[in-house]
Image (cartoon, rainbow, N blue to C red):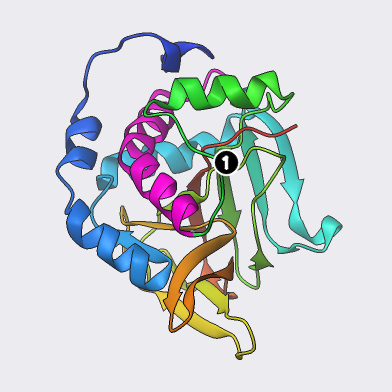
Amino acid sequence: MVRNSPHAVATPRKRTPCDSRVATLDWTGITAHLDGNGWAVLPGLLSAIECHALADLYAHNGIFRSHIVMQRHGFGRGEYKYFSYPLPDLVGVLRTALYLQLAPIANRWNEAMGIDVRYSAGHADFIKRCHTAGQTRPTPLLLQYGAGDYNCLHQDLYGEHVFPLQVAVLLSEPERDFTGGEFVLTEQRPRMQSRAAVVPLRQGDAVVFAVHHRPVQGTRGTYRVNLRHGVSEIRSGRRHTVGIIFHDAK
């Protein structure tokens, strides 16, 4: 498999079908749902063939920088692997194309929350910022769950420079490849009880969601709400997901 170089995001590349697929999603509707809920579904982001190809990468240890067994760290049960640079082509294309659409939303959210940080239009420039600050390890990852596995509620922060949105793509088909294993989000508003959301996904669908917090318009102005995400227990089968995180880690 040909993979992109670690600096591929900084050089021109040909547009791919995946670029076009990302660009033609209903970004008006996606943005509205993100603003109202802190998450939105990107339907049909990957084909079944692309999903199988990415899931099959889990067996190829040479393309990963680390392997995490969740139970050893109190993260839940299951495991995941962080890709090394160079990223697999499809993962690199997704990271670049999705960032292009999400950067304006991230900038608008930060402005609403009174956060001074702004994000460049291109992902390459943002990655340069991360690397200058010592965040040089790639964060896109491939997750694998079996029966009885789950992922505790958490946030993927990794360092000082954090892009406020991330994407998870379901590579397996619910009720065929696995049962259970719903993607779950919780939102904690000030002086209120937490609100939970179970995100409906099919194979190839993705969910874009807030990494840490999002702005909410209240009667006294805009305030921040805190979000965490996780995966409920897998009852049977095997579930694979690819995670697209746009900032790198220390």
The residue located at (68%, 52%) in the rendering is 79
Q: Is residue 105 left or right of residue 156?
A: left
Query: Between 52 and 94, which is closer to the camera in this rendering?
Result: 94
The image shows residue 129 at horizontal and vertical percentages of 60, 24
Q: Is residue 83 magenta?
A: no
Most extreme residue toward the right is 72
- In the image, residue 190 sits, relative to residue 134, either above or below, namely below
Q: Which residues are magenta?
A: 85-112
- Mark 1 is surrounded, within 10 Å at the Cα level, by few (under 14), some (14 to 19) or many (20 or more) other residues, namely many
1 or 42: nearer the viewer: 42
Q: Quadrant of the C terminus?
A: top right
Q: Position of residue 233 (x, y in %)?
A: 60, 75
Does residue 131 appear anywhere in the picture? yes
Q: In the rendered image, which residue does mark 1 sit on?
A: 141
Q: Quadrant of residue 150?
A: bottom right
Residue at 28% across, 58% down: 31
Secondary element type, mark 1:
strand
Image: 203 above or below 22? below
Residue that extends furthest to the front in the rendered view of this protein: 220
Q: Main secondary structure of the magenta part?
A: helix
Quadrant hosting residue 92: top left
Residue 186, compared with residue 178, is above or below; it is below
Residue 201 seen in the figure: no
Q: Amino acid at mark 1?
A: Leu
172 vs 117, left or right, is: left
Q: Residue 99, percent across and down?
A: 39, 37
Quadrant showing the N terminus: top left
Q: Position of residue 55 (x, y in %)?
A: 46, 43
